[in-house]
């Protein structure tokens, strides 16, 4: 299994919301990654992704717990 397959998307939203959620996951010891396709595209010299939309992924083995935290933190977005 490659490294990308070990993570599942938990949340997509603003960079501020993703940073807050990432801090909560870190406090619980949940391995996570952030991906900003728009920022990556700009750095590489081409467009990609939506401005202001950042993706947060959690390790597959912790996905359900991470998803629960995301839903409790931002219930209005479910």
Image: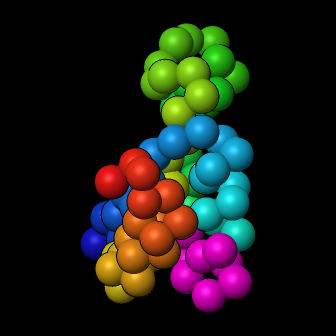
Q: Quadrant of the N terminus?
A: bottom left
Compared with 14, 59 (above or below) is below
Q: Quadrant of residue 71?
A: bottom left
Residue closest to the eye, 3 or 24: 24
Q: Please provide percent x and percent y for residue 49.
A: 46, 24
Q: Please provide percent x and percent y for residue 59.
A: 43, 75
Does residue 37 appear in the picture of this structure?
Answer: yes
Q: Quadrant of residue 39?
A: top right
**Residue drawn at 52 percent across, 13 percent down:** 47
Residue 3 shown left or right of residue 24 in the figure: left
Residue closest to the eye, 9 or 69: 69
**Residue drawn at 55 percent across, 82 percent down:** 30
Q: Quadrant of residue 16?
A: top right
Q: Please provide percent x and percent y for residue 28.
A: 62, 87
Give the extent of the magenta segment: 24-32
**Residue drawn at 49 percent across, 22 percent down:** 50
Does residue 41 appear in the picture of this structure?
Answer: no
Compared with 62, 67 (above or below) is above
**Residue drawn at 61 percent across, 63 percent down:** 21
Residue closest to the eye, 36 or 17: 17
Residue closest to the eye, 12 or 75: 75
Q: Please provide percent x and percent y for residue 8.
A: 35, 63
Q: Quadrant of the C terminus?
A: bottom left
């Amino acid at each position: 299994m490659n490294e990308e397959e070990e993570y599942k998307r938990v949340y997509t939203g603003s960079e501020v919301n993703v940073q807050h959620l990432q801090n909560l996951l870190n406090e619980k010891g949940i391995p996570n990654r952030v991906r900003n396709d728009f920022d990556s595209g700009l750095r590489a010299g081409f467009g990609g992704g939506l401005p202001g939309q950042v993706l947060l992924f959690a390790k597959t083995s912790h996905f359900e717990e991470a998803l629960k935290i995301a839903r409790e933190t931002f219930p209005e977005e479910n």
